[in-house]
Amino acid sequence: MKHRLTIILAALVAIIPFGSNSVVSSQSPAGARLNVAVKDGNGVPVRDAVIMVYPAKGSGGLRYKSGKAVMNQRNIQFDPGTIIVGKGTTVSFPNRDRVRHNVYSFSKAARFEMKLYGKDQSRSQNFPIAGTVALGCNIHDEMKGFVKVVDTPYAAKTDHNGLVQIASLPSGSAKLKVWHPKNRVRGGETVIDIAITGSVANQTVKLALRR
């Protein structure tokens, strides 16, 4: 009996990975798992697309777990290029470069400016409104980054294979939102109605991307 149990557990572990990015949005192990694959018009995987799921049944009071939210400035770019945070999260912006940066945003969800600061210095900003916050640097025009502020606990980014897995979802109908900065639709966000049935659901989304 012990040997059979070991085999079953090993099989379950082998099934779980779908992409390198995954999120378990509830403390409860119950719920369905949604596997999402994002591709462009040529079938090429799209990395760093933000996936958000809004179940019709709601989120049961759960919030997105941002953890320690950090947007580095490294090698004259924002690192990582896109981060996901829940509403009300404060993000740190440490400067890892030897040159000074002046971080700003004119986005509707957050308008701010961080005056010039140098190597190993840091600034922070709170993000109380859900939406897309585009980042720039007044000194280096080539620097572009994004903070995606979400109001659902079910959110994650696709990996380099364009894959992501979101677990602990309630069954039933839901809205699936897929955001990417190069997505041609308004606001960069594609919205799809989906149905989550059974323990595992799969969804492929194709985006028309700007070059």
Image: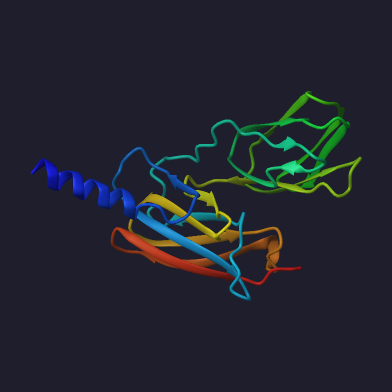
Is residue 133 found left or right of 38 in the rendered image? right
> Residue at the location (54% across, 56% down)?
51
Can you name the residue that lies furthest to the bottom here? Answer: 42
Can you name the residue that lies furthest to the top here? Answer: 121
Is residue 14 found left or right of 135 in the rendered image? left
Is residue 185 found left or right of 4 in the rendered image? right
Can you name the residue that lies furthest to the right here? Answer: 139
Residue 84 in the image: state x and y as whole percent: 60, 44
Q: Is residue 96 above or below residue 52?
A: above
Q: In this view, does 56 lie above or below 155?
A: below
Q: Is residue 38 above or below residue 133?
A: below
Task: Name the quarter where the N terminus is drawn.
Answer: top left
Is residue 56 found left or right of 132 in the rendered image? left
Q: In this view, does 72 lie above or below 142?
A: above
Residue 104 in the image: state x and y as whole percent: 82, 40
Which of the pair 40/123 is nearer the observer?
40
Residue 38 in the image: state x and y as whole percent: 55, 65
Which of the pair 126/165 is nearer the observer?
165
Q: How many marks?
A: 0
> Residue at the location (70% across, 45% down)?
109
Can you name the residue that lies furthest to the front here? Answer: 3
Task: Name the quarter where the C terminus is drawn.
Answer: bottom right
Residue 97 in the image: state x and y as whole percent: 82, 32
Residue 179 occupies which quadrant of the picture? bottom right
> Residue at the location (54% across, 46% down)?
151
